[in-house]
Amino acid sequence: MDLNKIFIKNACPTKIGGQAVLEGVMMKNQRQIAVSVRKSTGDIHVKKYMTKAVGKWAKVPFLRGVFAFVNSLIMGTGTLMYSAEVLEEDEGVVEEKGRFEKWIDAKFGSKAAYNFMIYSSVVISLVFTIGVFIILPTVVVNWAKHVTENAIILNLIEGLLRIAIFVLYVVAISKMEDIKRVFQYHGAEHKTIHCYESGLELTVENCRQFPTLHPRCGTSFLVFVMIIALLTFSFLGWPNLFWRITSRLLLLPVIAGISYEVLQYAGRSDSTIVKILSYPGIMLQKLTTNEPEDDQLEIAICSMKVSMEYDPDKSDEENTEIRTEKGFYKPKKHFNIVPEKGEEKK
């Protein structure tokens, strides 16, 4: 693997980021966000909207990493849900609301119900992530204290187990057909950002030449979190299980803040040290990104171009719109989110 193709020497790093969604890509440029989703007709459904301006605390080094992590969870969950709704509407599927959702809708309005769904999904995701990747490893490794009392060795085993669980989880979901499609869009997102940061015109041909791996990927951020957690927890010794779990939960924001700063630095530098630090995350991106098709690159390019349409002289409402882009490639296959009765999910 040639890291010089990933850490492009003459590229101009930006803060533009993105995320793969169901049959689409989200791109974020400053406060402008664009979500593009491929419909079964071949047209692209595009939603452009603004995010709230961040407060002063969200700009402070190390603290900004915590805010960025929480915001990305909320925004990422929201865009995923939105892409699912677009596909369901495209397929003519009407999902029946549950009793609790109907009650919230009637009591507080449809917007409150939608926000409840997003925030509850974020909370569930956090509980799952903390439980599986933070608490479970230290509980499992608790037996090892009967073999050795060396705190450094015990923390090393815990850290390696945490990384192993994460890698196995990624490998497992990467085998799912629907996730493979999402990972292709992830690759398309990275290629498009590489193309833009290299100063080339955003075309399918230009984007195709770049790798699917990028230094500022969220996958690399998670790897930084696990490595920094391993090093940080090693300084705490090996107290009883309650204090180990408590200390790990309390230090999560600190670790997230440090990891974010390391990731941002990695995205701006092509030094040998940065390449070495980034190598584990880059390697893991080989699992979370796949080579995209031309129609998927086109989706990422569409989101990138729309996210660049931000006009600071216009109001947030004027910078927001939903539209359909026509005349694009038709996809070779389309994601069927809810199969009809008697039909196998494609």
Image (tube, rainbow, N blue to C red):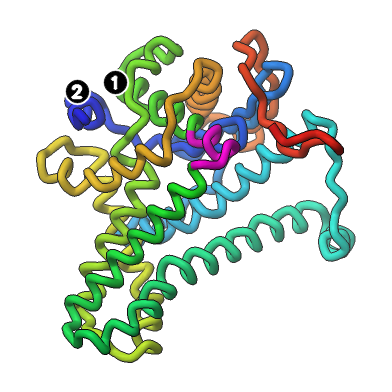
Return the x and y of residue 143 as percentages of the image width and height: 33, 84
What stretch of residues is rendered in magenta?
175-183
Pick the residue in front: 184 or 248.
184
Q: Is residue 286 above or below residue 226?
A: above
Pick the residue in front: 245 or 257.
245
For the residue marked with disc 1, what is the amino acid? Answer: Ser
* Distance (Cα) linking label 1 and label 2: 7 Å
Apparent side of residue 181 relative to residue 59 in the rendered image (left or right): right
Q: Quadrant of residue 56?
A: bottom left
Cβ atoms under marks 1 and 2 closer than 8 Å: yes
Residue that label 1 marks: 198
Quadrant in which the C terminus appears:
top right
Q: Is residue 279 above or below residue 71?
A: above
Q: Quadrant of residue 228?
A: bottom left
- For the residue labelled by badge 1, is the local secondary structure a helix, a strand or a loop? loop
Return the x and y of residue 117 as percentages of the image width and height: 70, 57
Residue at image position (89%, 60%) is: 106
Apparent side of residue 212 relative to residue 86 in the rendered image (left or right): left
Return the x and y of residue 12 as percentages of the image width and height: 26, 27
Pick the residue in front: 239 or 18.
239
Q: Is residue 100 visible?
A: yes
Return the x and y of residue 279 as percentages of the image width and height: 22, 44
Is-magenta flag for residue 29?
no
Residue at image position (33%, 44%) is: 284
Quadrant in which the N terminus appears:
top left
Apparent side of residue 296 relative to residue 223 in the rendered image (left or right): right
For the residue marked with disc 2, what is the amino acid? Answer: Asn
Residue that label 2 marks: 10
Q: Is residue 61 visible?
A: no
> What kind of secondary structure does the magenta stretch mostly adopt?
helix
Residue at image position (76%, 39%) is: 338
Q: Within 10 Å of the Cα at label 2, are there few (<14), some (14-19), or many (20+) other Cα atoms?
A: few
